[in-house]
Amino acid sequence: MSTAEHPNTQTAPAGLPPNVITLPQTAQLEALYTIIRDKNTPRGEFIFYSDRIIRLLVEEGLNHLPVIPKTVETPTGATYEGVAFEGRICGVSILRAGEAMEAGLRDVCRSVRLGKILIQRDEETGLPKLYYAKLPEDVASRYVLLLDPMLATGGSAIKAVEVLKEHKVPEERIIFLNLISCPEGIRKFCETFPKCQLITGWIDKGLNEKRYIIPGLGDFGERRYTI
Ligand code: URA
């Protein structure tokens, strides 16, 4: 079956906010998602194939960093007019599921600095509440790859960006990477932070009454960490 004939294979939906980028919606990518969405996929396979998608997301994130001209001399004695990354980066994971994306970032950027943010729903107010944040001390001068595999309502991601902004990270230096998103979360996140970039692997249909993404893959943290 060709990509064009396949009922689920999609080009990114039209009308997305300009700061949303999807991974190329190829048949290969959909095959990876089919494995991790399958409730019968064992944990080891879930980790292997979700790591493959995370790697693609990280690479795509790096594609959106600014570069400056850099000229080098090659072993042939010729000069090559290339580019180098303009700024430094760090990763910030939203615990606990976002931690699963750290290794994928380290594979690509070997000694990358990492921070962590823990946000949970406040029992009394029902709103996302910050419980813990540990960020690189120079986070304000870095580009931040914000890591959370599932963009559902957008509550945690919005709170995390608020925390980064309180630490003086400019909105336009934040790139939020997620494996699966839905229109509700995308809309809310992009309305709140129109200057952040949002890179998502796949946009699903929506949320169910328990705020799980549909079709989704269930609870990412549970599937990743629970045997
Ligand atoms: N977090 C998950 O792990 N899964 C969802 O569907 C939504 C949020």
Image (cartoon, helix red, strand yellow):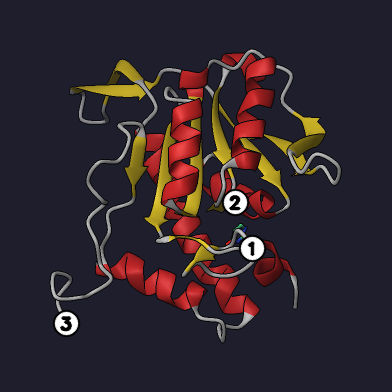
Quick check: 107 above or below 194?
below
Residue 142 position within the rendered picture, expressed as x and y whole percent measured from the top left: 56, 20
The CA span between labels 2 and 1 is: 24 Å
Quadrant including the N terminus: bottom left
Q: Amino acid at mark 1?
A: Lys
Q: Would you say 212 lies left or right of 199 here?
A: right
* Residue underneath mark 1: 210
Residue 208 picture quarter? bottom right
Q: Nearer the viewer, residue 85 or 152?
A: 152
The CA span between labels 2 and 3 is: 32 Å
Q: Amino acid at mark 2?
A: Met
Q: CB of residue at label 2: within 8 Å of ligand 1?
A: no
Labels 2 and 3: the sequence-earlier one: 3
* Residue underneath mark 2: 101
- The crowd level at tag 2 (other Cα within 10 Å; few <14, some 14-19, many 20+) is many
- The crowd level at tag 1 (other Cα within 10 Å; few <14, some 14-19, many 20+) is few
Q: Amino acid at mark 3?
A: Met
